Amino acid sequence: MGYNIDVKKAIANRGNLYRMKELMKRARNGEKLTIGFLGGSITQGSLSSTPETCYAYLVFDWWRKQFPEAEFTYINAGIGGTTSQFGVARVQSDLLNYEPDFTIVEYSVNDDNNEHFLETYEGLVRKIYMDKNEPAMLIVHNVRYNDGGNAEDQHVKIGKAYQIPCVSMKSSIYPEIEKGVIKNREITPDDLHPNDAGHALVASIITNFLENVYTEIEEKEEKVGELISPITLNTYQNSVRYQNTCTNYKSNGFEGDSSKQEVITDCFKNGWTSMNQGDSITFEIEGSGISVQFRKSIHKPTPIALAIVDDDMEHAVRLDGNFDEDWGDCLYLQTVVEHAEKKVHKVEIRLIETHENDVVPFYLVSVIGTW
């Protein structure tokens, strides 16, 4: 099903194309290159009928077909229900360790449209941009197809500040839905996740941009100079995630999960579990920010915990393992402390409420320190 989209409207920011043009020249010369994607459930491929009909794979396939002499590797680091706050904590292990040459970042329907996620997004973009492999980057703004909502207003500030190209589904696909030219259910069953036709449409917006870059490949582009200073406090760029393979904790009743994680989307692994009220686990975490990652489960009831930093009970944060939605267990990330003094903090997770008929234990996935 073809759609007549004004693809020029998709360009939210042209950015500096030096890295992208240099990458395309390398691809034209037949080099071995890695194409990487980081984002949420849309990048993971949610509601595409096969992994190969996801927009990410379709974009990867464009590179293969456009440059048949090159050898490409595909890295899909999408995890559903996660934000750029978690993205910056895992981007090194899940993406940058594979030395990508091209990276798409997609979190605009995962992050809320506020300054907190402006800061987490800046940390993520800076971390990728400053990587030793100097990957070319493209920011993708997906959209909610029922109301046009997303975090593009915040995210595009980062794209413009760092001269990174940005393409928008809000300014390209969504207007056609508003006009009735495209019916929602033709491209999405839930107004968020594309079906195969929707994934193909998103991919076509991206590949059209890439094709236009390729037509300009011989036009000189100046390399971006010295990296700018952050436009936020930027206390998330350095994020360290602690799981049960680390040694900076003491457990009083929490048990480590030793089951093997097969893929990155198998999220509830390498953490700790407990079902007994009063059980606790205590960490020594360096940073100016602390967040706690735990499971919110659809299998209820589930125990409830408290996160206590530096014995400050007055500002302790409740960690409720009961999920109030029904789409599946949620890998939930709770900010506990932000913009505090950078030092080693004592972080205690304590079970404060259990039930005789608890269906599953409280699952602590990780604790993250940031600065």
Image (spheres, rainbow, N blue to C red):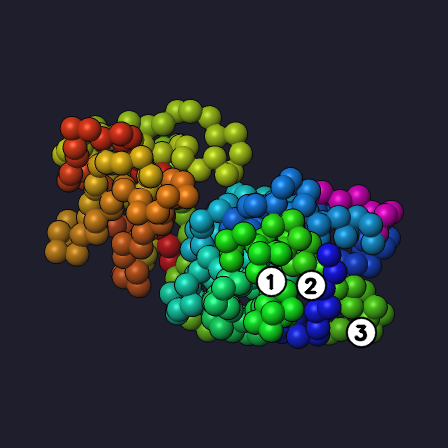
**Vertical placement of residue 156 versus 87, above or below:** below
Distance CA(mark 1)–CA(mark 3): 41 Å
Q: Which mark is residue 220?
A: 3
The location of residue 296, given as percent across then percent down, is: 32, 42
The location of residue 9, given as percent across then percent down, is: 66, 75
Q: Is residue 21 left or right of residue 96?
A: right
Of the two numbered discs 3 and 2 on the same chain, state the one appearing first in sequence: 2
Q: Is residue 91 visible?
A: no
Q: Foreground mark, 1 or 3?
A: 1
- Which of these two is toward me, 118 or 128? 118
**Callout 2: helix, strand or loop?**
helix
The reply to whether discs 1 and 2 touch (Cβ–Cβ < 8 Å) is no
Start-end of magenta stretch: 67-74
Q: Residue at position x 57%, y 56% from top?
A: 185
The location of residue 264, given as percent across then percent down, is: 51, 38
Q: Which mark is residue 216?
A: none
Of the two numbered discs 1 and 2 on the same chain, state the one appearing first in sequence: 1
The reply to whether discs 3 and 2 touch (Cβ–Cβ < 8 Å) is no
Q: Which mark is residue 183?
A: 1
Quadrant assignment for the N terminus: bottom right
Q: Where, by quadrant of the figure, is residue 97 drawn? A: top right
Residues packed near mark 3 inside 10 Å, few (<14), some (14 to 19) or many (20 plus): few
What residue sits right under mark 2 in the picture?
A: 205
Residues packed near mark 1 inside 10 Å, few (<14), some (14 to 19) or many (20 plus): few
Q: Foreground mark, 1 or 2?
A: 1
The reply to whether discs 1 and 3 touch (Cβ–Cβ < 8 Å) is no
Q: Amino acid at mark 3?
A: Lys
Q: Is residue 10 visible?
A: yes
The location of residue 307, given as percent across then percent down, is: 22, 47
Q: Residue at position x 65%, y 49% from top?
A: 196
